Amino acid sequence: MYDVREWRHVFKLDPNKEIDDELLERVCESNTDAVVVGGSDGVTLENVLDLLVRVRRYPVPCVLEVSSIEMVTPGFDLYFIPTVLNSTDSNWITGLHFEAMKEYGELMNPDELIVEGYCIANPDSKAAILTQAKKELDTEDIAAYARMTGHLLKLPVFYLEYSGMYGDITAVQKTADILRDTNTTFIYGGGIRTAEQAEEIGQYADVIVVGNSIYDMPEEALKTVEAVKNNV
C-alpha cells in the first residue's frame, strides 16, 4: 500500500484533456511520486478508464480523485475523496459521500480511501463554481480550514487548491506551520508552472501537485519533479 506521507510531487491529469503517448510516458517516468486522475468538468467513466489503462503501462502509482459517483471504477491504487470544507452546498461536504457509501460501500477497500479536507482558494476556478465554494478567502480563513482538518477532524490530507492560480505564499507558509505537528499531510495545488515555483511552494507543502502546465508548457512542468525532490 502506498503512503501519501512519503510523497513530494504529483502530476494531476485531466481525463477531459488530450495527452499524447510520448508526453504521457515522460510524465509517468519522470520520477513523480504518483499520477492523479481528476477534473472538474467533462469527466466520464469512459475517459477515466481510457486514462487509467494508459497510465497502467507504467509502475507509477495511479490515484483517482473522485468528483462524481459516476466516475468511480476499480483499478486505481488509491482513491482521494475530497470533502470541500468551504463549499456552501452540503452535497460537496458529506452528501455525495453518503450516496457513495450507500451504493458502493460494501465493495470498497477502506485502506484505499483517503479523505481530503479540501479548501478551494481561487473563487473564479471551475472547481469553486461547481462546488459553490465561499469566495475571497483570506489567510486567516485558510488557516482556520487547516486547523479544522488537522486539529479538529484529524483528516489524513489537507488540500489547498488554488486551481490555475499561483497561491498566496503567506497562506501556504501559515498552513504548513499549523499542520507541522499533526498527522495531516499538506498538499498544495494551483498555478505551479516552473521549477522555481515548485521549489518555493515545496519549502512548505509536503506534496505539490502540477496539473495544467503539463498541457501548456510540458518541458517546464517536467522540471518541477526534481526541483521539489532535491529540496527536502
Image (cartoon, rainbow, N blue to C red):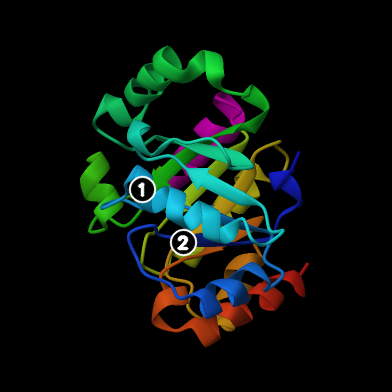
Q: Residue at x 56, y 25 (%)?
A: 152
Image quadrant occupied by the N terminus? top right
| Residue 3 can be seen, yes or no | yes
Amino acid at the residue labelled 2: Leu
Q: Which residue is mark 1?
A: 46
Up-down: is 26 above or below 38? below
Residue 68's image quarter? top left
The label number, if any, that marks residue 13 in the structure image:
2
The residue depicted at 34 percent of the width and 66 percent of the height is 17
Residue 133 image position (x, y, % from top left): 27, 42
Relative placement, left or right, of 84 versus 195 is left
Residue 136 drawn above or below residue 103: below
145 lies above or below 121: above
Discs 1/2, front: 1
Task: Give percent across and percent down for residue 60.
Answer: 68, 58
Residue type at tag 1: Glu
Mark 1 Cα-neighbour bin, 10 Å: few <14, some 14–19, many ≥20 = few
